[in-house]
């Protein structure tokens, strides 16, 4: 299936959006804006928005974890600089290097980067096959952004409708 105005297949553009969502957020943003402005294909639009929103979520979480990690290490270095050098004379190792090894946010960032890489590979393969990629939480955000939430029709109450009912006597 071809995209109408771009002449590139929908599957290739979707896979490209997921790849650049992992590789470069700037290029993913350019692809997202281009596809949203030009394409009318719903599957392509949803896949590109899923890729863009997913990469933004990973970027925000990584940023928050890195700020927590930097703050933790900054506090440890300040405490160590306030006169805790005597600990390094008692012990044979540097106390700062021990606390550096205890930085859990650094390990969480590494795990998150690996999870992002694996997810993007899986999503690139799914998108290259032409399937609509559905990421559980992100997909609901994308549907709301695209006004894709289907409005449920209220059941019509036959007693309140303007049509004639069986109990009415025609005049």
Image: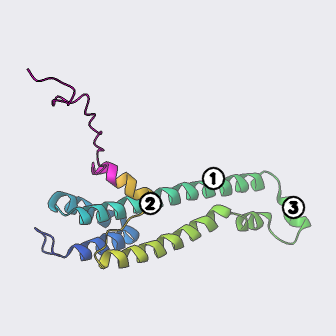
Q: Residue at x 57, y 57 (%)?
A: 65
Q: Which residue is drawn at 19% across and 64% down?
A: 41
Label the magenta part by its dominant secondary structure: loop
What residue would you read off at disc 2? Answer: 136
As measured in the structure, the alpha-carbon distance from the residue carrying label 1 to the one carrying label 2 is 32 Å
In front: mark 2 or mark 3?
2
Q: Splitting the image into 4 quarters, where does residue 90 fall?
A: bottom right
In front of the other: 30 or 89? 30
Q: Are discs 1 and 2 less than 8 Å apart at CB?
A: no
> Relative to residue 63, is residue 129 drawn left or right?
left
Q: Which comes before the other along the chain, label 1 or label 2?
A: 1
Q: Mark 3 points at which residue?
A: 87
The Cα–Cα distance between marks 2 and 3, rounded to whole angstroms, is 50 Å
Labels 2 and 3: the sequence-earlier one: 3
Q: What residue span does the magenta drawing correspond to?
A: 143-171
- Residue 71 circle label: 1
Q: Residue at x 83, y 71 (%)?
A: 93
Closer-to-camera residue (86/20): 20
Q: Residue furthest right?
A: 90
Label 1 environment density (alpha carbons within 10 Å; few <14, some 14–19, many ≥20): few
Identify the secondary structure beneath mark 2. Answer: helix
Question: For this rendering, which residue is in front, 150 or 45?
Answer: 150
Q: Quadrant of the N terminus?
A: bottom left
Total labels drawn: 3
Front position among marks 1 and 2: 2
The numbered mark, 1 or 3, whose residue comes first in the sequence reads 1
Instruction: Give the image location of residue 119, x and y in percent.
Output: 46, 72
Q: Is 87 displayed left or right of 60 in the figure?
A: right
- Marking on residue 63: none
> Counting other residues with Cα less than 10 Å from the Cα at mark 3, is it few (<14), some (14-19), or many (20 or more)?
few
Which element is circle 1 on? Answer: helix
């Amino acid at each position: 299936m071809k995209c109408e105005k771009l002449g590139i297949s929908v599957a290739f553009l979707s896979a490209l959006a997921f790849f650049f969502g992992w590789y470069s957020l700037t290029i993913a943003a350019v692809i997202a804006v281009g596809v949203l402005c030009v394409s009318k294909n719903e599957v392509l639009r949803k896949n590109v928005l899923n890729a863009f929103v997913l990469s933004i979520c990973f970027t925000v979480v990584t940023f928050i974890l890195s700020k927590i990690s930097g703050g933790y290490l900054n506090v440890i270095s300040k405490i160590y600089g306030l006169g805790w050098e005597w600990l390094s004379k008692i012990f044979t190792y540097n106390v700062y290097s021990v606390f550096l090894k205890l930085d859990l946010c650094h390990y969480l960032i590494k795990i998150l980067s690996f999870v992002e890489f694996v997810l993007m590979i899986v999503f690139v393969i799914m998108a290259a096959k032409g399937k609509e990629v559905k990421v559980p939480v992100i997909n609901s955000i994308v549907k709301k952004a695209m006004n894709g939430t289907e409005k449920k029709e209220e059941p019509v109450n036959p007693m309140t409708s303007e049509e004639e009912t069986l109990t009415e006597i025609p005049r």
